[in-house]
Amino acid sequence: MSGMSQPPHNRSSMPTPSARPDASMSLLTHVMDHSLDEGYAEASARREAEGTAGLPRTLKAKLALAAGLVLAAMVVTLGAAQAQFSAPVLAKERQELIDRVQVADERADGLEQNIERLRADVARRQRQALKQHGGDQGQLVTLLSGASEVRGPGVKLVVDDAKGSSAAGGGKPRENTGFSDTGRLRDRDMQRIVNGLWQAGAEAISINGQRLTALSAIRAAGDAILVDNRPLVPPYEVLAVGDKKRLGTAFQDSVDGQYLRVLQESYGIRYSLSPADDVRLPAASSLTVRTATAEEPKKGAS
């Protein structure tokens, strides 16, 4: 019946369209859906309508395109040819540089061997001169001067840098250093170690195969330790000839031995001291006396 009222529609029961997950990203969605700018799209449609889109149709345009392609091909070909021509030249120059470096290395090795040979010859002549002028005490003179090899009982002290690099401030026992301590053994540390061994009764000392004499110098070049201008590499092996029972104990009880112990406790420097039955020390590489002269024996002296 037309007079009957219709039941109202329940909007809540009607399905609602789900919102797009990218609704909050309208700008990005628009860019993705319309990747081509509207102006470019309009210009492309106009060219298609006018019949000017695609490849050129006139003879003049075709010739211009062909000329451009030929020019581009010539440029690519010339570049490839030039690269192919330059490759052997560069390879030749590189090989020449390698050969020059190898020749220089071989020459340096030869000069170093010659220096070692001359140094050994000078040391031999010095030992002969000391024996000749020293008389019965020539062997003792060569021993005390470090001009001859020595062997005997003693101690072996191995000192190494700390495992890590610690940037501690200055302070005892390295006060007034002027730079931060890094757990590395310094030249002044090695000087104190050697002086402590001399004071404890060592008769001959070497560091990493470098024999120490009265003229030996322990210096620094950056963080490297130099002995007679020769760089040393850690760990540092210090060999000392002397009474193996008394030498080690006397060194540990000395001020310099306690200094080394503080370096271990405060800066992590590692060391080990052990007695040795047979210690072999090489002769000093060179003995150059610039100031001292031998005194002439007085006449009539017994």
Image (cartoon, helix red, strand yellow):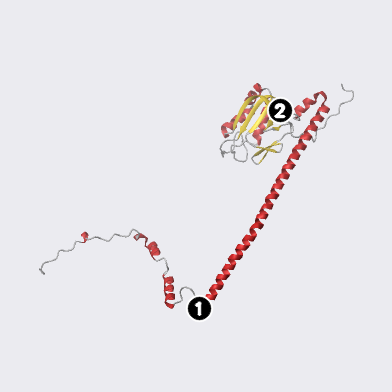
Pick the front one: 52 or 88: 88
Looking at the rendered image, the quarter that the N terminus falls into is: bottom left
Q: Residue at x 43, y 73 (%)?
A: 44
Q: Helix, strand or loop at disc 1?
A: loop
**Where residue 170 sits in the image (x, y, percent)?**
59, 38
Q: CA distance from mark 2 to mark 1?
A: 102 Å
Task: Report the amino acid beneath label 1.
Answer: Thr
Q: Position of residue 93 (x, y in %)?
A: 68, 55
Q: Which mark is residue 204?
A: 2
Residue 63, placed above or below residue 255? below
Is 88 above or below relative to 5? above
Q: Earlier in the sequence, mark 2 or mark 1?
A: 1
Q: Is residue 293 above or below residue 33?
A: above
Quadrant for residue 237, please give it: top right
Question: Which residue is at a point 62% across and 32% down the rendered structure image?
Answer: 159
- Give neighbour class at mark 1: few <14, some 14-19, many 20+ (Cα, 10 Å): few
Q: Is residue 137 left or right of residue 19?
A: right
Which residue occupies the foreground of this view, 41 or 216? 41
Name the residue carrying label 1. 58
Label ID, residue 144: none
| Residue 212, picture quadrant | top right
- Which residue type carries mark 2? Ala
Going 59% across and 65% down the picture, which residue do you hit?
A: 77
